[in-house]
């Protein structure tokens, strides 16, 4: 028996194409329209897709790894994310992630912080600049430093990451030649680490089976998300200069990630029929959770559309209501690295006065959520 119908946002040609036209044009608006109908709603993509954003929904989707599986979810459609620990399901996921965590965080975070600080200090903008373009290059170089000690070919690294910054369908298209060139360079550096040792992330991952794939996936997941967060944070602080003192920087990062979570939606495939929030989810259907919707839910946040870093001084965020890096067992491996990177970059950036000139910070969705741009700033 089919699951009963749920509220569903309008679609111009639903009988023929479901919600694909709306998803292709502006998926964030599609989710916002659905959220006006209730805490759980339905959209029609390749299969029935149930979208929820309450804490109870988030907790169930992110905790019950036997029922809600990563295999065959949206990440499968993105070559940059289709592989490694991201696509592993229970029970293999837990052991593999534990191994990666041990290796990923072997290098003391203090050393990583110094490396990032030096890289950003060498790439600080002067005068008029586009925060989005600057963040793209600065984050790429900082990741090159901590992943590869700056030894990865920068033109190749830039070419490899460029499709992630583009709109649909660029990040979803196969890039066999580009991926072969990238893998060859990565294999060269892996051989070098095994012979010579090192202190970067690649060295600590080099002893693992599947080190090449895990490194490639981690890099792809890290670049776009951090680039967009840094660009938004830089733009927001120019409009709110009262938050430039050192003690505000971590709170400014948290608030930027709340209002503009780069991982704006997550997906899972339902492995067995289950009832959640009183709704029957059939086996094989897709479920979405949306940090973007949860972070803007007025039931969870006071004045959710306002940029207010001071809200983080009042206590912890709502349980399962703040998910910039996911949550539970599948929480992002690079969470600590991303936070340190953003804090170091902003801490250096705000030492000089910055004036917003012109720009469009409105969110645009692709693989990640990013500002439409440009975001022109004058750093004096």
Image (cartoon, rainbow, N blue to C red):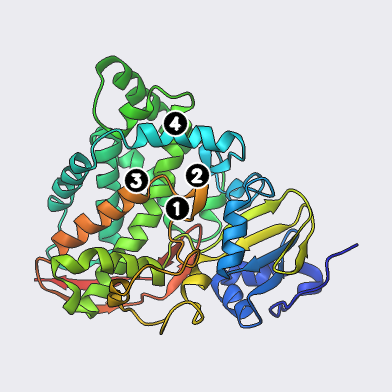
Circles 3 and 2: CB atoms closer than 8 Å:
no
Q: Which of marks 2 and 1 is nearer the N terminus?
A: 2
Q: Name the residue under label 2.
A: 80
Q: Is residue 138 above or below residue 365?
A: above
Marks 1 and 4 in Cβ contact (< 8 Å): no
* Crowd tier of the residue under label 3, counting other residues whose Cα lies within 10 Å: few below 14, some 14–19, many 20 or above: some
Secondary structure category for the residue under label 4:
helix
- Mark nearer the N terminus (1 vs 4): 4
Judge the density around disc 4: few (<14), some (14-19), many (≥20) Cα neighbours within 10 Å: few
Mark 2 and 1 residues: CB-CB less than 8 Å, in contact? Answer: yes
Q: In whole angstroms, how far apart are the C-alphas of marks 3 and 1?
A: 10 Å
In 3D space, how far apart are the residues under numbered discs 1 and 4 (Cα atoms)? Answer: 27 Å
| Image coords of residue 230 (percent x, y) | 29, 61
- For the question of whether residue 175 can be seen, the reply is no
Of the pair 241 and 303, the residue shown nearer to us: 303
Q: Which of marks 2 and 4 is nearer the N terminus?
A: 2
| Labels 3 and 1: the sequence-earlier one | 3
* Mark with earlier residue (3, 2): 2
- Residue at the limit of the structure toward the right, as seen here: 1
Q: Which residue is drawn at 68% across and 78% down?
A: 9
Q: Which-is-in-front pick, marks 3 and 4?
A: 4
Asked if residue 37 is positioned above or below residue 367 in the image, the reply reads below
Q: Which of 340 and 24 is in front in this view?
A: 340
Q: Where does label 3 land, which residue?
A: 158
SS at circle 3: helix
Picture disc at residue 99:
4
* Residue 313 as seen in the image, left or right of residue 78: left
**Residue 238 appears in the rendering:** yes
36, above or below 27, in the image:
below
């Amino acid at each position: 028996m089919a699951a009963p119908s749920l509220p569903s946002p309008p679609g111009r040609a639903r009988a023929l194409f479901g919600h694909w036209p709306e998803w292709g044009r502006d998926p964030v608006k599609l989710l916002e329209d659905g959220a006006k109908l209730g805490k759980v709603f339905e959209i029609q993509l390749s299969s029935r897709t149930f979208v929820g954003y309450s804490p109870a929904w988030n907790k169930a989707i992110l905790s019950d790894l036997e029922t809600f599986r990563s295999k065959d979810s949206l990440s499968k459609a993105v070559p940059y994310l289709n592989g490694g620990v991201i696509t592993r399901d229970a029970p293999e996921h837990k052991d593999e992630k534990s191994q990666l965590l041990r290796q990923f965080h072997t290098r003391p975070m203090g050393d990583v912080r110094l490396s990032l600080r030096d890289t950003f200090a060498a790439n600080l903008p002067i005068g008029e600049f586009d925060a989005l373009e600057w963040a793209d290059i600065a984050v790429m170089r900082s990741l090159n430093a901590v992943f590869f000690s700056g030894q990865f070919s920068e033109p190749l690294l830039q070419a490899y990451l460029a499709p992630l910054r583009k709109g649909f369908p660029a990040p979803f298209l196969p890039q066999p030649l580009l991926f072969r060139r990238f893998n060859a360079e990565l294999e060269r550096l892996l051989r070098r680490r095994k012979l010579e040792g090192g202190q970067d992330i690649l060295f600590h991952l080099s002893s693992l089976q599947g080190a090449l794939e895990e490194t490639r996936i981690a890099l792809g997941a890290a670049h776009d998300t951090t680039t967009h967060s840094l660009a938004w944070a830089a733009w927001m602080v120019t409009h709110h200069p009262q938050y430039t003192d050192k003690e505000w920087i971590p709170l400014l990062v948290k608030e930027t990630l709340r209002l503009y979570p780069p991982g704006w939606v997550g997906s899972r495939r339902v492995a067995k029929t289950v009832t959640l929030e009183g709704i029957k989810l059939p086996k094989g259907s897709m479920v979405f959770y949306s940090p973007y919707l949860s972070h803007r839910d007025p039931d969870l946040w006071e004045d959710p559309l306002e940029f207010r870093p001071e809200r983080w001084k009042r206590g912890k965020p709502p349980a399962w209501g703040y998910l910039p890096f996911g949550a539970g067992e599948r929480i992002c491996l690079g969470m600590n690295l991303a936070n340190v990177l953003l804090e170091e970059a902003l801490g250096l950036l705000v030492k000089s006065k910055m004036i917003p000139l012109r720009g469009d910070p409105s969110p645009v969705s692709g693989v990640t959520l990013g500002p439409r741009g440009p975001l022109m700033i004058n750093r004096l």
